[in-house]
Each structure stands twice: as C-alpha cells, then as structure tokens.
Image (cartoon, rainbow, N blue to C red):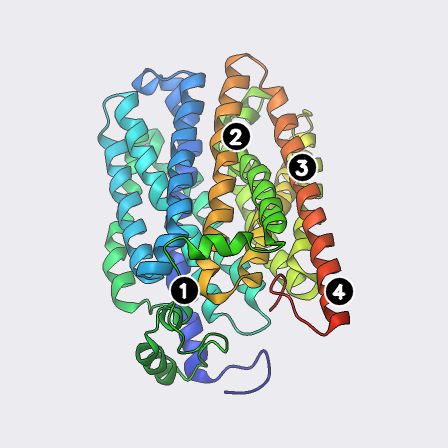
Amino acid sequence: MSSSPTALSAPSSRLALLVVGLCWLAVLFDGLDMFVYGSVLPHMLEEKALGITSGQAGDLGSYATFGMLVGALAAGTVADRIGRKRLMVSCVALFSLASGICAVSGSVAVFGLGRTLAGVGLGGLLPTAISMVSDYAPRGRAAITIGLLMTAHHAGGILSAYVALWIVEPLGWRAAFWVCVAPLLFVPVLAKWLPESLSFLVARGRADEARALAGRYDVELPAAETDKPATGGRWANLQGLFRGGEWVQTLLYWLASFGGLLLVYGVATWLPTLMRSEGYELGSALTFVVLFNLGGIVGMLVAGRASDRFGAPRISAIWFALTAGGVFLLSVHMPLALTSVVVFLTGVFLNSAQTMTYATVSIGSALANRATAVGWTSGMGRFGAVFGPWLGGQLLAANKGDWGFTAFALAGFSSMVFIGVAALRTARRTAAAGMSGRTTTIGAH
C-alpha cells in the first residue's frame, strides 16, 4: 500500500467504495424513515388522522426520537461487543418492520409504538455506520468520508418530501409508511456484502479474520492495538470516556450534541407545519423540506473538506453559529424566493454542524471504543432530539408557532458555545503535549 495519505491501491479503493456505498444506502433508508413523519404530518393534521392534535403530533415525534435515544445509547456498547455489521443489519430490519406497524395502526397508541420501535433502529444505525466508514476511510479523509455518508440521510429527507407529494395525496398517509417497509429487501444484500469492521476484529482478538480480510483487499490492519484482544469489563469502553481529564471533553460534546439534535429534529419534524403557520402554501412548505435537505447534502461535502483541513471542532462551532442566524430568520415572513435561499443555507450549516461533532468524536477516539464514544455522544444528544419535536408541538398548540424558530435558534447558539470551548481545550492540550513530547488521544488522526 502506498505511503501517501491519500493513495489507495485498487483493491482497497474497491473495499472503501463497497463499505461506504452499502452504508450510504442504509442511511438513505434511515433518513427516509426519519423525515417521512414530518413530511406527512400536515396531511395527518388536516385529515385529523387517528384523531391526533398538534400537541399529540409533537408527542409522537418525540416517541421516535426517544427510541433513537435508546438505540444510540445501546448501539455503541453492543456494536463493540457483537460487531458493527450484525448490528447494522438488525437496525435496518427493525425500523422497516416498525414502519409496517405505523401503516396498519388504528390508534395513536399503536402508531406511537411503531414510531418508538422505528426510532430504536434509526438511533442504532447512524452511529454504527459512522464508525464503520471511519474504519475504512482513506487516511486524512475521515471527515469528508463521514460527510459523504451523511448526504444519504438528507437524500432520504428529500425522498420523504416526494413521497408526501406523489403518494400521500392519491393513496393516503398510510401509503407513505408502507414505502418505508421496502428497505427490508435490502437486508439480505447488507448481510451478504458488508464486511465486518477491521478495528472491531482486531479489538476482539480475531486477528486471523482481520488479516484475511485485509489481505483480500490489500488494506492495512489498524496500527494500534493489533492482535491485542479487548480487555476489561462490560463498561470498560464507557469508563474510558471519563478517565483523567477526558470527562470534561466528553460532557462538552454531549451538551453540544443535545443542542444540535434538538435543533435538527425539531426543525425536521416541524419545518413544513411551521412554514404553513407562517402563511406559506403546503406545496411551498414541502418544497422547503427538499431545499433544506439539498442544503444538507451540500453542507456535508463542504464541511467534510473544511474539517479535514481546519479541524472538525472549529468547523462545527462556526456552522452552529451560522445555523442559529438562519433559523432565527425563518421566523420572519419574507418573500418566497428569499425564504427559499435562507432555508437552503440553513440546511447547509445545520445538518453538517451536528455531523462534524460526530466526526470530531470518531476521529479522536481510540479504536477499541470508537463506536461507544460516537454512540454515547449521539445518545446523549437524543435527549435534545426528544425535546425538540415536543417543544414545537407545545408552541403550536399554544398558537405560538412563531416562537418555534427562535427557540431552535437558541439551541444552535448553545451548541456553538460548547463546541467552541471543547475546541479551545483540545488546542491547549495538544500544544501542551507537543511541548512535553507527548501525544494526546483527543484530536489525533
């Protein structure tokens, strides 16, 4: 293998493309399932489907994000123990089957159960896929690879808007959730072709399997911890996030993730409905969903390149600041063309700001507990994801929908502060380690 940090042999290039491609499709279905509720929600409220009110709609949005919290918290620890491939396959199957429950539900309670179970699968898939592509990303290109992966999430959001436009109108809201059952057909493909994580195999002491896989595709085994079995108790990986001074950095990332996911899922759930409350037609409101997710795709690619060059913590903090400004502007009724530009730019910065938080944690984590670090950062953020949809529903129920964008903007500002403080601590620790001739794990690449 070439010593150049960006050079890859043909077999290793194929392996990277295979892993990223399969994970990209899995995250596409994740995004479709996540965003479809927000896209069909205006139809459900208009038809009074299942008898839901605005307040109940917010609760239902929070059920899914609560399930994501459970899935994300469990995913890191489970993936580091049983393997990331097996967990990814299970998560895709779970959220697909759960969408079937939503499609056949006859009450708010059953629908809520389906969204909660879907959330468990959605929450477990994303951090696991991020950890997987981090393992196979070319050296020096981890952030852009994660950014590329996350474009799939927003492609799923765009797909959900078109599902609402093309399928819900003639066939009803249940048809949208039947579409979300289709990823079950992808499960056998994922099970057959997705390789296991090399760092997982090495960390679990399965060196022969790791060598065979690395030899087949002409890639290097992870340099650290090679042939060293994982040691420690069940919670050893989690405890590692709090050893020494790591606990401060860990909490800062958790708080930033809380604000970021409150913002992401609050806006994702309520954007069409809030824009309708601002006086826009339903067709325009769903177009905003498309623009928002197109912005997310552009933002992932731009932020990934910028983060590989300038550092993911710095880019995440700047992006959160720009997001706060954009979301606040959405509370002001502007001409349609100007609003469309603001929605697009807000999508550019919002979605990639949160992803670069994950990139920061993933790149800076030790191989043995990388999935745990990303999973718990995502999981702690899910408390914000639960709160965001609920908050939007309560504000709408109180006829204060115009305050929704202001509340979400404040969440973005808080995340900027936490990431900024974390970046300053990282810079100081790295400088101190350099002066003493030592290296630090945080920020290591």
Dot 2 corresponds to which residue? 388
Q: Residue at x 45, y 18 (%)?
A: 54
Residue labelled with disc 3: 414
How far is mark 2 from mark 3, CA to CA? 14 Å
- Nearest to the observer: residue 7 or residue 417: 417
- Report the disc number at residue 21: 1
Q: Is residue 383 visible?
A: yes
Residue bearing the label numbered 4: 432
Question: Which mark is in front, 3 or 4?
Answer: 4
Whole-percent x, y for residue 90 in the image? 28, 52
Percent of width and height locating residue 121: 34, 45
Point 37% across, 49% down: residue: 29
Callout 4, which amino acid?
Answer: Ala
Say what secondary structure mark 1 lies in: helix
Q: Earlier in the sequence, mark 1 or mark 4?
A: 1
Q: Residues within 10 Å of mark 4 (few under 14, many from 20)?
A: some
Does residue 287 appear anywhere in the picture? no
Q: Position of residue 228 (x, y in %)?
A: 40, 75
Query: Cα distance, mark 3 to mark 1?
Result: 34 Å
In terms of image quadrants, where is residue 204? bottom left
- Give the crowd class for mark 2: few <14, some 14-19, many >=20 residues within 10 Å: many
Graded by Cα atoms within 10 Å as few (under 14), some (14 to 19) or many (20 or more), the crowding at tag 3 reads: many
